[in-house]
């Protein structure tokens, strides 16, 4: 009987440990998977992707993907966040992605640099966006002033 209690305790702890089939389940019911768990799901009959540290089983979506299944299979079993964002998917595509959600990337495998890179990109984009409209506006104003100056001088002659 003492062994049964240990077995039950062992299986309870097995549920909280990382398991290739089920992942690690947190108290909230979210399953966590390691990169090693995800890397084995890289075939057309078993395709997982990581996008923004979330895991998606997109196996059933491969044939429906507008860009073809090849582009998804190239990223299968790995982090496809950059490719997903580079394409510029619509809001509908992002919402559709939620139906394939199966869990999260384990905290130990998440890239801490991603948050810092995103912050740097955002601040860089905002400063460059100011320059994108400020420089042409100042140039146009200067040209307008010069035009009026030469036109007024030309009329008085």
Image (cartoon, rainbow, N blue to C red):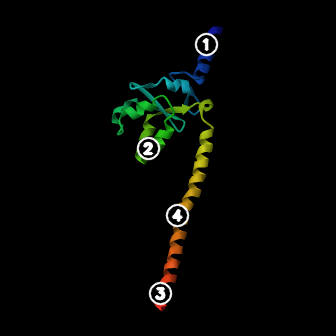
Identify residue for label 1: 7
- Mark 2–mark 1 distance (CA, rounded to whole Å): 49 Å
Q: Nearer the viewer, mark 1 or mark 3?
A: 3
In this rendering, position of residue 37 left or right of residue 96? right
Mark 1–mark 3 CB contact (< 8 Å): no
Mark 4 or mark 3, which is nearer the start of the sequence?
4
- Mark 1–mark 3 distance (CA, rounded to whole Å): 99 Å
- Secondary structure of the residue carrying numbered label 4: helix
Question: Mark 1, residues whose alpha carbon is within 10 Å: few (<14), some, or many (≥20)?
Answer: few
The location of residue 112, given as percent across then percent down, is 63, 38
- Secondary structure of the residue carrying numbered label 3: helix
- Mark 4–mark 2 distance (CA, rounded to whole Å): 25 Å
Is residue 7 visible to the viewer in this orientation of the structure?
yes
Mark 3 or mark 1, which is nearer the start of the sequence?
1
Identify residue for label 2: 87
Mark 2 or mark 4, which is nearer the start of the sequence?
2
Mark 1 or mark 2, which is nearer the start of the sequence?
1
Q: Is 3 located above or below residue 108 in the figure?
A: above
In this rendering, position of residue 100 left or right of residue 139? left
Looking at this view, is 101 or 121 the one in front?
121
Q: Nearer the viewer, mark 3 or mark 4?
A: 3
Mark 2–mark 1 CB contact (< 8 Å): no
Identify residue for label 4: 133
Instruction: Look at 40% across and 46% down and name the residue there.
Output: 92
Q: Is 1 located above or below residue 119 in the figure?
A: above
Identify residue for label 3: 154
- Secondary structure of the residue carrying numbered label 2: helix
Mark 1–mark 4 CB contact (< 8 Å): no
Instruction: Look at 50% across and 25% down and name the residue there.
Output: 39
Q: Nearer the viewer, mark 1 or mark 4?
A: 4
Mark 3–mark 4 CB contact (< 8 Å): no
């Amino acid at each position: 009987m003492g062994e049964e209690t240990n077995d039950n305790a062992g299986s309870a702890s097995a549920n909280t440990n990382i398991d290739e089939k089920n992942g690690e389940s947190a108290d909230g019911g979210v399953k966590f998977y390691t990169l090693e768990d995800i890397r084995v799901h890289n075939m057309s009959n078993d395709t997982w992707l990581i996008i923004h540290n979330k895991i998606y089983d997109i196996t059933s979506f491969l044939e429906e993907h507008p860009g073809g299944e090849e582009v998804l299979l190239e990223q299968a079993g790995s982090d496809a966040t950059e490719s997903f964002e580079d394409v510029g998917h619509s809001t509908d595509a992002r919402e559709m992605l939620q139906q394939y959600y199966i869990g999260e990337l384990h905290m130990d495998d998440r890239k801490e640099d991603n948050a810092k890179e995103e912050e740097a990109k955002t601040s860089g984009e905002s400063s460059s966006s100011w320059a994108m409209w400020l420089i042409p506006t100042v140039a146009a104003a200067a040209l307008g002033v010069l035009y009026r100056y030469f036109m007024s001088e030309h009329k008085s002659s």
